[in-house]
Image (tube, grey):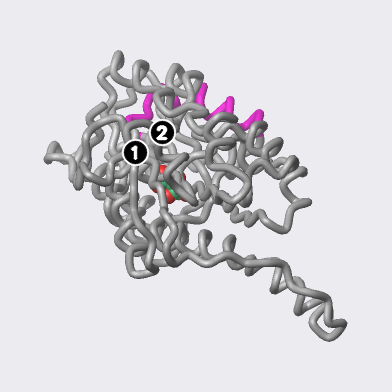
Amino acid sequence: MKPEILVLGTLWTPETRAQLCELFDCHFLAQLQEGERADLLASAGPRIRGVLTTGVIGIDGTTLVALPALEIVAVHGVGVDAVPRELVAARGVRVTNTPDVLTEDVADLAVGLLLACVRRLPMLDRYVRSGQWEARVPLAHARSLRGKVAGIVGFGRIGQAVAQRLTPFGLEIRYFQRSEGPEPQRRSSSLLALARESDMLIVCTPGGAATQRLIDAEVLDTLGPEGTLVNIARGSVVDEAALVAALASGRLGAAALDVFENEPQVPQALFEHDNVVLTPHVGSNTVESRRAMAGLAVANLVAHFRGEPLPTPVVF
Ligand code: 8YV
């Protein structure tokens, strides 16, 4: 008998779905209406032994309660902040994620967003399309990267990959994280010190309680009217209301955001600004990364049900 699993979210390609259905007895929750979901959890919930979910959806307490036989939550993503760690630990449920395979693509997006923001690329695209070039409307000022300081918040795998990419642009790299990291001479003494020392902050830290609204009004004010904020981590790391206010008043220079506090809701006020670049949480959204992530998430489920070591367990 195949193990029964619950699949959350809509990110699954036809190939992944076919593979999943071959290996497991699958229940795809996203296809169901609200009432049908509750019925499914009530009827099949007690038999479900595994969950496959996205980094953003994770799993909530109600779903966990409906799955008393749950053994493993395989997260398709590196971030596990949407998995309630105390609840899964108390139940002895194992958690896996998909680190490494997405690092390069996420770092690429951070660099792309930074360039798009300081050179105002989306705005320039709108300028050309709307005939403003023909009308000889003056261009907005863009800023140079060379000689500036990029401050990286969270110097883990992704933060370091961003640093590696930015160095050839002539940027000096500094970083802050609570734990000591590589190249200690680049580590600022605090987040505020990093904001003070940097022209741009690139947020690469994991989400979760420990980093909740780390980038607050004080950090944004310290970064200042010439400063740029890039966030490819989690919306929860930035105080979004403070960010909106800082941009509206010109206390922050510019922002490039791939993640938001309440996705897919994006504060309408951000649409007003030409110095803001917005993307819909697509750091890992390349064919290559998503294929590798799905492969790794499935490999973790397979290993678990075969009693083999998990390829990428999360140790909370
Ligand atoms: C994905 C992510 O958008 O890896 C993460 O933590 O947030 C992203 O890669 C998402 O997890 C896809 O499931």
Q: Is residue 224 left or right of residue 51?
A: right
- Across and down, in percent, residue 243 comes to 63, 38
Q: Report helix, strand or loop for mark 1.
A: strand
Question: Is ligand 1 within 8 Å of the beta carbon of the residue shown at mark 1?
Answer: no
Residue sitting at x 57%, y 62%: 118
State which quarter of the image contains the N terminus: top left
At 40% across and 39% down in the image, what residue appears? Answer: 194
Q: Is residue 210 magenta?
A: no
Answer with left or right where residue 266 lies relative to residue 272.
left
Instruction: Categorize mark 1 by other alpha carbons within 10 Å: few (<14), some (14-19), many (20+).
Output: many
Which secondary structure type mostly characterizes the magenta part of the structure? Answer: helix
Question: Does the magenta-highlighted stretch encompass residue 40?
Answer: yes
Question: Given the current orientation, which residue lies at the most extreme bottom position?
Answer: 134
Toward the top, the furthest residue is: 90
Q: Please tell me in which quadrant of the rendered image residue 102 appears.
A: bottom left
Type of the residue with mark 1? Phe
| Outermost residue toward the left in this view | 308
User: Does residue 176 appear in the picture of this structure?
Assistant: yes
Residue position marked by numbered label 2 in the rendering: 191
Q: First in sequence: mark 1 or mark 2?
A: 1
Q: What whole-number distance in Å separates the C-alpha atoms at marks 1 and 2?
A: 6 Å
Q: Are marks 1 and 2 in contact (CB under 8 Å)?
A: yes
The percent position of residue 132, horizontal first and vertical second, equals 83, 78
Q: Nearer the viewer, residue 199 or 40?
A: 199
Q: Is the residue 16 above or below the residue 239 in the image?
A: below
* Stretch of the chain drawn in magenta: 34-50
Q: Amino acid under label 2? A: Leu
Query: Which residue position is annotated with label 1?
Result: 176
Q: Is residue 97 above or below residue 115?
A: above
**Residue 292 point in image, percent of width and height:** 32, 59
Can you say whether 44 is above or below 166 in the image? Answer: above
